[in-house]
Image (spheres, rainbow, N blue to C red):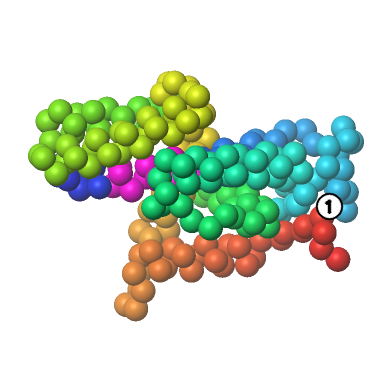
Amino acid sequence: MGKEMRFSLKKSRLLPIVFGSAVMIAACCAVAAANGSFPWNAMKWQTDSGEAVEAYVNGEPILKKTLDKAIGDTRKMEEITARLFPSKQKSSKSESEVLDDLIKAKVLEQEAEKEGITVTDRDALDSLRATDRQIQDLMENGSEEEKKNAKESWDTLTSVASALHESMDQYEKNAVPTERNILIQNRLYQKYVAGHSSMTETKQEMWDGHVAELMKKADVKHRDSP
C-alpha cells in the first residue's frame, strides 16, 4: 500500500480519536464495568452498592455515572472543537444521543466477543504510537501534499492535547479506550464484509445495515421506559 493511501487511511481515523474520544472513552468504561461483579437483575435500576443504572443492553448495565461523565466529556470536547476548529463544529448532542452512543458501543463490543475478536489496551496504544510515527515520517519524508496533510493532523492532535492540559503521552494513554473501540469495529467490519457480498450495496452500506440490524435485535431497556 502506497504512502498516500496509508496516510489517508490513518488520517481518517484521527478525527474519531480527537473529536469522539470523550464519548467512546466513557463507553469503554461502561463495558469494563459491565464485565465486573455487579449484583443486579433485569428489573433492578440500582446495584447493591447503590449505583444507579441508566440502561441495560442485553442484560449488561450502563451506569448513570457513566452517562453523566460521557455527557460532561462531550460538552468539554464540543467547547474545545468550537474554540479551536469552528469550521468543524457540529450541533450539540442531546443527552439521549450520548446514551445512544454508549448503547451502540456496548452492542458492538458484545458482537466482537461473540466473533472472538479481542483488542488489548497494549494493541490500542501501539496503534496510536504507530500512527504518530507515520505522521512524523510523512512530515519529514513525504511529498509536499503529504507533508501538508501530516502537519495539519499533528497540529490538530497537539492542539486538542494542549486544550485538555495534557502531554501527548498522557493524551495517547487517555485515547486508548477510543482507539481500542475503533480497532474492534474495524476488525468486525473487515470480518463481516469479507463474508458477504452484494450486487446493489457498497461494503459500507452492507456494514451499516448489519449494525442497524444488531441494534434492532439488541434487548435494550431504559430507566425511563414504561
Magenta-colored segment: predominant secondary structure: helix
Q: Could you say which is closer to the camera, residue 80 or residue 43? A: 80
Q: Amino acid at mark 1?
A: Ala
Image spot of residue 74 (x, y percent): 58, 44
Magenta segment: does it hold 136? Answer: no
State the residue at coordinates (53%, 43%). 79
**In the rendered image, which quarter contains the N terminus?**
top left
State the residue at coordinates (24%, 32%). 134
Place residue 49 in its image quadrant. Answer: top right
Query: What's drawn in magenta, residue-wise?
Result: 9-20
Image spot of residue 165 (x, y percent): 50, 24
Magenta segment: does it hold 15? Answer: yes
Q: Residues within 10 Å of mark 1 (few under 14, many from 20)?
A: few
Image spot of residue 199 (x, y percent): 32, 77
Tag count: 1
**Residue 58, visible in the rendered structure:** yes
**Residue 34, visible in the rendered structure:** no
The residue beneath circle 1 is: 42
Query: Where is 181 relative to 205, above or below?
Result: above
Question: Viewed as shown, does residue 22 lie left or right of 13?
Answer: right
